[in-house]
Structure formats: structure tokens, C-alpha cells
Amino acid sequence: MRKDIYALGFKAQPWWWEAWTPNTALSQDPPARTQVVIVGAGYGGLSTALELRRNGIDAVVLERGVFGIGASTRNGGMISGGTNLGKGLGGKSPIAEEFERNKAALMGAGADSLTVLEDIIAREGIDCGLHKNGRFVGAWTPRHYDDMATKVEVYNKYANAGASMVPRERQHEFIKSDYYYGGMHATRAGHLHPALYYKGLLEAAHKAGAILCANIEAERTEKTATGWRVLTAKGPIECSEVVVATNGYTGDLTPRLKRRVVPVASHIIATEELPEPADKMLIPGMRAIGDTKRVLTYYRPSPDGKRLIFGGRARFTAAPPEVSAPALYQYMVDRFPQLDGIKITHVWTGNVAFALDYMPHMGTDEGLHYLLGCNGNGVAMMTYLGTQTAKKIAGGRNTPINPLDGREFPDHPFYNGDPSWFLPAVGAWYRTRDWIDRRLAG
């Protein structure tokens, strides 16, 4: 590992925060009564509040930290619709078989998530560096390439993905790297600046009349004759409905939901400004890039094309920058040897939430609405689930409004919501499997 990557030092915070820093500027004190209390002010909570207000329903959003401190300003900002849900295609497990039976509806919901995101950005005039120029998924092995090829027709039929296979000899048209064995290009995908999108969503919810409350934790919920009482340090809030939109930060307020999501750390680095624009040096067309490794990586140019934002599973649990940065740097140089010696300026981490069936979920649990478990694809999906949850509340809580609504949300008898005892072993096993697959590929 080159030591000079640290010569200029780096900030242990998201590069996105150079454009917008989490703050409390729009925070208000909560009222004693409202119609809906939303726990969590990420993409899911804010999109719920925005859509509720568009339907004339009062909403209060509680954020236990400052606005934007969580995953909504810590992610890679990559967006797609439907293809990520299709990862379960072709498997032999009961989950895969259930997905196969319902693939049209489920992938259709995934495609709708991107439409909802784009509509909100356009309607609210959110300036967030949106690039709708596709995504290339690199094949870790020839077998992975063949597996993706079997899914292209389904992606295009049910998710309108605009997907096609790219053989290895054409790979440089999409990525200036020989690292992969070809891959798949989906045109209906892209990336944005996650913190500026968050800022726009926060301001839109505020403008619409939602009451946004920073540094106020929902400590407990109590059922009442007319709905709910949410207890906070600022006093109780009486309401008709409660929405839980905590995703990778789901805690003891909802222990039943905590046992249904697995928080996994995702680590990201940002390079210094590149010697040449990223579209010329690394990624023609400024596309988003992912791969098929179990210990996956994902990366994209910054919106201005001057830097590379590179993320992945440096560890499956939280790790200090001194641990995650060298690992990610090596992953980056493996793919782009031309970046050897480039310096990194920012290192950070955030939690993504995996469900045990690898599917996003919305619904109700013991009377509480929830939207959780986006499995690393939350920019569009959490926005979609929040919007859909609000529409369901506005139209009547008992009728599912999409195929993700009310699906069985599995838990496990040996999982209590703390994955720290098994995630390191899972990471080690995945790395071993990746190594074996690559060696067998030659």
C-alpha cells in the first residue's frame, strides 16, 4: 500500500458535505398534537412528510440527530430502477422462488421507484447533479457474465431497464479498465449528489408545511383510544398514525422491526481532483459502476467529473478511516492502475439496511407503519416507499398499494438486531468465495 495517499491528510467525513453540511436550520419544536408522526428524517421520512402535506395531512418528523447526519448524505448517490431487485432471479431458495412468481410486479415497483424520484426532483426543482446516463455492472468472473446475460430479457421486459450485455472486448467503451470479464449496461440508471438531493427534499417538506424536529428522539410509543402517543424529551405528541423510517439506524424504539433489518457498514473514499476529467480517464459517459462480487464495490465520478467516489465493503461493520481507507484504495487501484499514487481527501462510512430476504419492505407492524430494508439501494427506493406510505395513509390504511406493501417481513430466532457477532464471519466467507471464484476463472 502506498503511504503517500495520506501525505495531504484526509477528512473523516463525506465529500458531499463540502456542498451541504448537516444542520438544524429548519428545526422546530414539536406540537402537542398532529395527524402523523414520522420517526427518522432520511429520504424515507422526508418523502413521507412531503407527500402527506401534498394531501393536506399534518406531519411531524422526528430526527434524533441533526438533519442529514445519517445514510441519506453518506451514500454513493447511485440510482436505478428494478434491476437491483432482480438479483434474486434464478436461485433455488424459497425467497428466490417467491420472487420468480411475482417478478413482474416486484420489478415493476422497482422501476416505479426511479420514476417517483425523478418526478420529485423535477417538480420541486431540486438541483442535485442528476446524471441519467446508465450503469455498468462488471462481471467478476465469466460465470457471472453468463448469469447476468440470462436476466437481461427479464430486466427489459419488467423494469424497462434498457439493459444489454457488453463483452470484454468492448469493455473500454464503458470503463477504462481490464479488471472485469465484460458486464451489463443498463441505460435506466445514473447517479446524483446525495446531500444536495437531501437538502432539496428537506426544504421541500418544510415549504409544504411539515414540522421538522432535529435532535429530538422518539423515546417510546403508546397506543391510545384515538391513535398513538409518542414520548419525547420535549413532551408527548398525540397523533393518529406513526411511521417508522429509520432503516439502517433502526433501534430499540421498535424492537420487532430492529430484528428484521441487518445494518451493514458501507465505506467510501473520495479522491483528490484527477489529472484528467473522469469521463476521459476512467469512465466514459460518466456512468455509475458496480460489480458482481459478493464483497462488492461501487463507484462513480463526482457530479462535476473531477473526482472519483469509490465505495464498497472494506469491512461489514464500522471501522476507523485508517482501516477502511487503505482497503478501498487498493480495491480502486486494482481496477484503475492509472490511479496509483492519487491521493484521497475524504473517508467516511454509513449504514445500509438489509432485510433477511434481500427485499425492501413497507407495511404495518402492531399498528405502526414502516418502510425499511432497501439493501443498499435506498436513494430511489426509500423515496418511493415514503411516497407510497403517505398515499396509503391518505387513502386508507387497509389496502396494499404496491407489491412491496405488506409482504412477509422475516426475522430469525437467533438474531436480536445486533449483527456484530456474525458479520465478520460472513465477510470472511464472502471474501473466500470471491477469491475461489476468481482463481477458477483464470
Image (cartoon, rainbow, N blue to C red):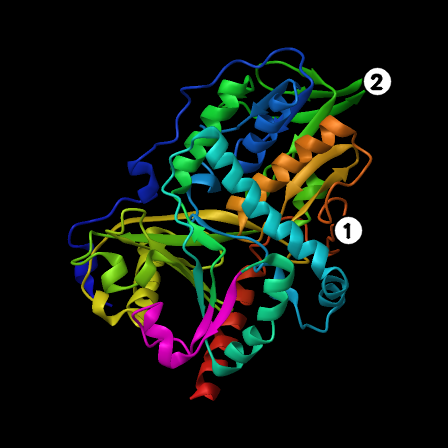
Q: Quadrant of the C terminus?
A: bottom left
- Quarter of the image with the N terminus is bottom left
Could you say whether the residue bearing mark 1 is in a helix, strand or loop?
A: loop
State yes or no: residue 165 in magenta: yes
Badge 1: how crowded within 10 Å, few (<14), some, or many (20+)? few
Name which residue lies at 69% across and 27% down: 242
Identify which amino acid the numbered label 1 is placed on.
Glu
Amino acid tagged 2: Ala
Checking the image for residue 225, the label placed there is 2
Residue 161: where, in percent of width, then height? 55, 59
Residue at horizontal 20 percent and vertical 66 percent from the top = 2
Give the secondary structure at mark 2. Answer: loop
Q: CA distance from mark 1 to mark 2?
A: 28 Å
Residue on which disc 1 sits? 408
Q: Can residue 40 be seen here?
A: no
- Give 80 or 268, whichever is nearer the viewer: 80
Left or right side of 41 for 106: right
